[in-house]
Amino acid sequence: MAGDQGLNNVVTTVREARQPSLTRRLSGVLHRHRRLRLALLLVAPMVVLVVVYLGALAVLLVSAFWTTDDFTGQVVREGTLDNFRQLVTSDVYRAVTFRTVGVAAAVTVICAVLAFPMALYMSKVASPRRRKLLVVAVLTPLWASYLVKAFAWRAMLSGDGVVNWALAPIGLEGPGFGLTATIIVLTYLWLPFMVLPVYAGLERLPDSLLEASSDLGAGAGRTVRSVVLPLAFPAVVAGAIFTFSLSLGDYIAVQIVGGKSQLLGNLIQGNAGAANNLPLAAALAAVPVLIMVVLLLGVRRTGALENL
Amino acid sequence: MRLSARARAGLAAVMVLGLAFVYVPLVVVLISSFNTDRTFGWPPSGLTFEWWSRAWDNPGARTALATSVKAGLGATAIALVLGTMASFAVARYRFFGRDAVSILIVLPIALPGIVTGIALSNAISTTLSPLGVSFGLFTVIVGHATFCVVVVYNNVLARLRRTGGSLEEASMDLGADVFATFRHVTFPAVRSALVAGGLLAFALSFDEIIVTTFTAGASVQTLPLWIFTNLARPNQAPVVNVVAALLVVLSVVPVWLAQRISSDPAGGRI
């Protein structure tokens, strides 16, 4: 009997050795089934993003076609185009939309004009040691709080603030609070979002191309115009997507330094909050979404999306 | 690049101006936090530490700071898991709808925050409230996670594209199973990208105000919400200024961390 017991033990050991452990088998299944691996990787992120995010966006879009009862303030779930009709026909909404797009465009252009020479200096002129320091210097404010930066400019632009104090000796006065201040603050807030992609784009640009251009007789200006700018364009567009989109939906900066000016974000916020007219807020929110979608589709071919 | 001395000087001048534009307001906040004058007239009339000690004892600011840290950690944890999974799927597989997946991940950061904010707020009040989920820390974390996923995703994706799959194939050929390969080969390769992405995700969440406004409800106040509410109260101005100055100083920490951990001077991609 004792011998049988020993034999049994041997048999079990051999069987265990032949039968791989659970993790090993699971690994084998995963290894053989590529599709299963892919599905396991995708299911959680997609469930969250599609259900939570796209779902919420879809409901919002649908509610743009609803309306509210004037008397009770309750949302009435009947399809109507009233909100959109109001958007298109009302002078106020049209003016605010144009003003918002104008502010976003101005911020984007100023950011690009400031960021391009900065990025060019960082990537092609500065020594490698200094380059690293400059990247850190540009990046650090990105971590400083949005509100702190807007708040800083409130202190800068206020009546007895730094700007007026610095401009007083030359007989000038700062812009005070208003649309100009809003553009300054938004430019300030989003500048790193433009510098970094442009810098990354320029850094990828091989120096040999620039040398070839100057060997062929082009001056620095011509090289920048004909070689650097076309190749860096997707990176600039990538930065522009950030600055434009971020400016388009902003309503905090304009509340802090904008004086009485209103942008689309303020109208959306006002209707979603105080006015309790979510359908109208949803219709208003469709405006920046539509602008961004058109913009993203438009720049798809420039390759900017790979630079995001 | 061969540039004339004048062109170099011009570029350097723009660089200096740009950096001055970026740093002067932050330095002004720092100095103002020691200003004896309550209204922060410039130049400061005198220096004092009173506001710093008062801010330290402010219970509202402390609670808000703790809430912000909790929300940031929660959103970062979700973003790390989901962003990594999505980036592996997109980097290592070809499948129908891959472009749609990558657009869907970028969408929450490409669309204005207020759109995300009212969409989530509407969804919570119409569909989740009947199910017993109400506005609070949980909804803030989920709201933040939607746009934090993209920064982790971008960082890990860039790393995966750079490293390629050949090391993993070699590991499998040498007999390591899927899990051992992940633990010993893939994970060490993406670790610093995860740190960079996680830091950015935390910073985005810590700083977020618009989405927070719409998902927090009345009971939860993050630090940005606290600052924004107290901005309008003149007698709170010195304390708000100290909190702002503190946040300016603290913003150096993640940059320093990213420098130590990753070789990428930019400390990751946006």
Image (tube, coloured by chain):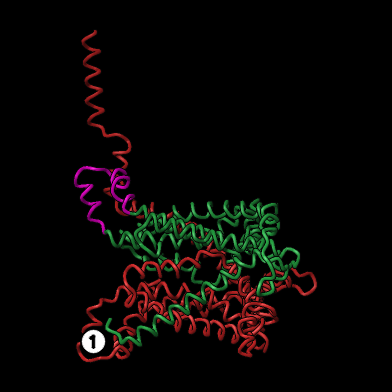
Q: Is residue A87 visible?
A: no
Q: Which amino acid is tagged 1?
A: Ser
Q: What residue appears at the point 58 percent right and 77 percent down from the top-left corner?
A: A185
Quadrant (top left/top right/bottom left/bottom right) for the N terminus of chain B: bottom left
Q: Is residue A98 visible?
A: yes
Q: Position of residue B160 (x, y in %)?
A: 31, 59
What chain does badge 1 belong to? A
Q: Is residue A58 above or below residue B185?
A: below
The span picked out in magenta is B164-189
Residue under label 1: A213
Task: Please identify the quarter of the rendering in which residue A184 is found.
Answer: bottom right
Please state if A3 lies on the left or on the right of B51 as rendered: left
Viewer-closest of B40 and A100? B40
Please state if A44 lies on the left or on the right of B237 as rendered: left
Which chain corresponds to the colour red?
Answer: A
Q: What residue appears at the point 29 percent right and 39 percent down from the top-left corner?
A: A25
Viewer-closest of B85 and B260? B260
| SS label for mark 1 | helix
